C-alpha cells in the first residue's frame, strides 16, 4: 500500500499567505536577534579593550552554538512538532538578548549570547522542514525565498536599527529594544502559522534512527555539496559584514556609527534577490541560478577593494545580492533533494551554514588584523571560487539518487 498523497498547501491560497507571513516573521526574528551585535563590534572593542577578532566572539559564539543546537532541534522536532518548537525558540532567544543587554561584563555578554544562539536552533532547522512538508513543490521556491527574505529584513533591521539607536542612546538600549520587538514577532508568528498537515510525529526518541537519517543524507551524492556551498557563502557574507565596519570608520572613509550602519540597508536588495532567485529557480533550474549567485558575489568582492566609498557600498550591495541568491536556492534545494527525514537534512545544511558563519567569519578577523582589507578579499575570493566550482558540479553533472531500501 503506497503512502497517502500529501495535503499540500497551494500557492495563492489564504493558508499559503499565512504560512508565508509567519515564516517571514520567523526569519526576521532569527536574524535580527542573531546579527544585532554585528554593527556593535567596534563599540565592544572600544568599551572592553579587545581586538576586532575578539569582539566578533559576540557573534561567532552565537552562530557556533546555533550550529550545534540545529542538530538537536531537528531531531527533537520529529517528536515534539514544528510549530511549538519554533515559537519556544524565538521567545527564549529574545529573552536571552534582553539578558545580554543588561549583562555587567564582557564575559557575561558572551555567555548570554551563546545561550541565545543555542536557543535559536529550533527556528532555522524546523522552518525549512515545515515548508518542504507543507507547501506544494510548485510554490516551494517562492515560499522559501520569502522566508529567506525575512532573514534578510531581520538582518537589515537589526544592523541598521542597532547602529542608529546605539549612537543616539546606547548599545544596551538598542539590544533591549530588539529583544522586545522579537517577542512580539514570536506571538504574531504562532497566531498566524497553521498546524502541520503532513508532519508525522515519531512515537519515541530513537538516537540510532536519527544517526541513520543524518548518515543517509551525508551519503547522498549531491546533498553534501549543497551543505558545503552554504558553509562557504555564509563565511564570505559574515566576514565582509563583520569587518567592513572597522574599515569604514577608519581613514580614508571616517564614517560615523550611524553612517556605517546605514550601509547594512544593502539587505533590502537581499530581500528582493532571495524571492526573485527562488521563483527563478522554479522556472530555470537551481543549478544555473546557484552558479550565478557565486559569480555575483565575486563581482561584489572585487568592487570593495576600491578607495571610492560609492564603489565600496556598491560592492557590498552586489555581494549581498549574490549571497542571498545562492542561499535561497541552496536552502530550497535541500528540501527537494532529501529523501525523507527532511528535518534532518535541513539541520545538516544549517549546521554547515552556521559553522561557516562562526569559523570562517572569525578567521576573516585574523586576516583583517594582520594584513588589512586586501587580505580579507583574497581570503573570501578563495571561498567563492570553491563555491562556484561546487555549483558547477551540481549543474553540469546531476546525479539521480536512489533511496536505499529499508
Image (spheres, grey):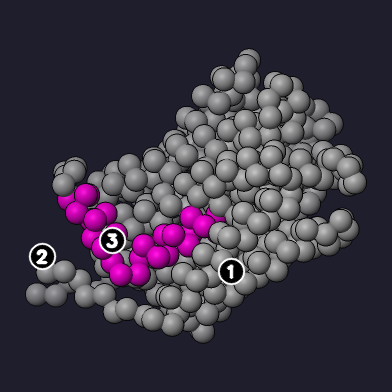
Q: Kindly indicate whether the residue at mark 3 contacts the one at mark 1 (C-beta within 8 angstroms).
A: no
Instruction: State the image quarter where residue 48 is shown.
Output: top right
Disc 3, SS: helix
Instruction: Please tell me how many numbered marks the rendered image carries.
Output: 3
Instruction: State the image quarter where residue 260 is shown.
Output: top right
Query: Which mark is nearer the camera, 1 or 3?
Result: 1
The image position of residue 237, as x and y in percent, is 62, 54
The image position of residue 54, as x and y in percent, is 62, 30
Look at the image and tell me whether residue 84 can be seen.
no
Disc 2, SS: loop
| Mark 1 crowd level (few <14, some 14–19, many ≥20, 10 Å Cα) | many
Q: Nearer the viewer, residue 55 or 21?
A: 55
Disc 1, SS: helix
Residue 245 in magenta stretch: no
Q: Kindly indicate whether the residue at mark 2 contacts the one at mark 1 (C-beta within 8 angstroms).
A: no
For mark 1, what is the residue? Answer: 294
Query: Which mark is nearer the camera, 2 or 3?
Result: 3
Distance CA(mark 1)–CA(mark 3): 24 Å
| Numbered badge on residue 217 | 3
Task: Say left or right for 305 vs 155.
Answer: right
Q: Which residue is located at x 12 percent, y 69 percent?
A: 405
Look at the image and tell me whether residue 50 can be seen.
yes
For mark 2, what is the residue? Answer: 406
In this picture, which residue range is highlighted in magenta? 209-234
Q: Which residue is located at x 35 percent, y 70 percent?
A: 222
Distance CA(mark 2)–CA(mark 3): 15 Å
The image position of residue 111, as x and y in percent, is 51, 24
Which numbered disc flags the more N-terminal residue, 1 or 3?
3
Amino acid at each position: 500500500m503506497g503512502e497517502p498523497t500529501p495535503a499540500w498547501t497551494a500557492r495563492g491560497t489564504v493558508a499559503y499567505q499565512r504560512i508565508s507571513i509567519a515564516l517571514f516573521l520567523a526569519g526576521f526574528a532569527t536574524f535580527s536577534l542573531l546579527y544585532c551585535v554585528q554593527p556593535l563590534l567596534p563599540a565592544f572593542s572600544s568599551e572592553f579593550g579587545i581586538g576586532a577578532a575578539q569582539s566578533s566572539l559576540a557573534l561567532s559564539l552565537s552562530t557556533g552554538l546555533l550550529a550545534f543546537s540545529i542538530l538537536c532541534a531537528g531531531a527533537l522536532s520529529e517528536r515534539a512538532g514544528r510549530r511549538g518548537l519554533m515559537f519556544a525558540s524565538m521567545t527564549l532567544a529574545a529573552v536571552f538578548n534582553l539578558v545580554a543587554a543588561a549583562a555587567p561584563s564582557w564575559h557575561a555578554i558572551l555567555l548570554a549570547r551563546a545561550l541565545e544562539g543555542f536557543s535559536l536552533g529550533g527556528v532555522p532547522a524546523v522552518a525549512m522542514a515545515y515548508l518542504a512538508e507543507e507547501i506544494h513543490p510548485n510554490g516551494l521556491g517562492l515560499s522559501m525565498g520569502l522566508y529567506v527574505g525575512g532573514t534578510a529584513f531581520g538582518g537589515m533591521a537589526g544592523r541598521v536599527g542597532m547602529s542608529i539607536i546605539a549612537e543616539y542612546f546606547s548599545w544596551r538600549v538598542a539590544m533591549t529594544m530588539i529583544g522586545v520587538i522579537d517577542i512580539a514577532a514570536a506571538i504574531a508568528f504562532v497566531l498566524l502559522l497553521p498546524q502541520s498537515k503532513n508532519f508525522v510525529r515519531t512515537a519515541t526518541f530513537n538516537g540510532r534512527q536519527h544517526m541513520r537519517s543524518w548518515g543517509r543524507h551525508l551519503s547522498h551524492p549531491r546533498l553534501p555539496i549543497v551543505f558545503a556551498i552554504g558553509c562557504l557563502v555564509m563565511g564570505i557574507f559574515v566576514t565582509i559584514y563583520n569587518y567592513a565596519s572597522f574599515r569604514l570608520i577608519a581613514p580614508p572613509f571616517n564614517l560615523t556609527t550611524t553612517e556605517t550602519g546605514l550601509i547594512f540597508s544593502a539587505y533590502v536588495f537581499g530581500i528582493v534577490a532571495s524571492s526573485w532567485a527562488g521563483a527563478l529557480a522554479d522556472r530555470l533550474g537551481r543549478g544555473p541560478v546557484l552558479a550565478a549567485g557565486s559569480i555575483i558575489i565575486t563581482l561584489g568582492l572585487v568592487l570593495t577593494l576600491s578607495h571610492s566609498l560609492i564603489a565600496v557600498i556598491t560592492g557590498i550591495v552586489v555581494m549581498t545580492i549574490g549571497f542571498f541568491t545562492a542561499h535561497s536556492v541552496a536552502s530550497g534545494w535541500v528540501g527537494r533533494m532529501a529523501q525523507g527525514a527532511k528535518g534532518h537534512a535541513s539541520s545538516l545544511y544549517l549546521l554547515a551554514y552556521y559553522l561557516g558563519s562562526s569559523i570562517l567569519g572569525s578567521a576573516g578577523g585574523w586576516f583583517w588584523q594582520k594584513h588589512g582589507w586586501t587580505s580579507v578579499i583574497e581570503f573570501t575570493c578563495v571561498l567563492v571560487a570553491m563555491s562556484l566550482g561546487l555549483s558547477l558540479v551540481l549543474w553540469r553533472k546531476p546525479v539521480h539518487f536512489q533511496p536505499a531500501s529499508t
